[in-house]
Amino acid sequence: MLRRHADGGVARQLVHAAVDRAARHQGRQVWLKVLSTNVPAIELYSSLGFVELARTPEAFEQRPGADDLRLARSLGVASPGLMG
């Protein structure tokens, strides 16, 4: 996500679109990966119902201190603002 769009809700709209599309195609869960150092993204995903399922510590040699996080969100129950 480009910094100039970070506060404009573009990321939220993209996640909504991906979740909605998965739900329309009978998806059961949406997964994503994010660096542990990307706090704004983690906060966004958490606010949309994503939870951490796995963490790979120090996964990237070129990014010391950054863990690779795998987040997921069930599509069984709609979150506020999604699918509607």
Image: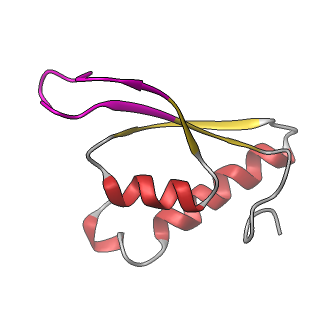
Please indicate whether residue 52 sits to the left or right of residue 58 in the image: right
Can you say whether 59 is above or below 14 in the image?
A: above
Direction bottom: furthest residue? 8
In this image, 44 relative to 67: left or right? Answer: right
Residue 46, placed above or below residue 22: below
Could you say which quadrant of the image residue 28 lies in? top right
The residue located at (85%, 45%) in the rendering is 76
Instruction: Name the residue located 12 percent from the left edge and 30 percent from the top edge.
Output: 64
Q: Quadrant of residue 47?
A: bottom right
Name the quadrant of the C terminus. bottom right
Residue 59 percent across, percent down from the top left: 26, 21
**Quarter of the figure with residue 41:** bottom left
Magenta stretch encompasses residue 61: yes
| Of the pair 21 and 28, the residue shown nearer to us | 28
Residue 12 higher or lower than 23, as above or below: below
Overall secondary structure of the magenta section? loop
Q: Which residues are magenta?
A: 54-70
Taking the spot 35% from the left edge, 30% from the top edge, the residue there is: 68
Estimate the x, y position of residue 42 in percent, counting from the top left: 42, 52
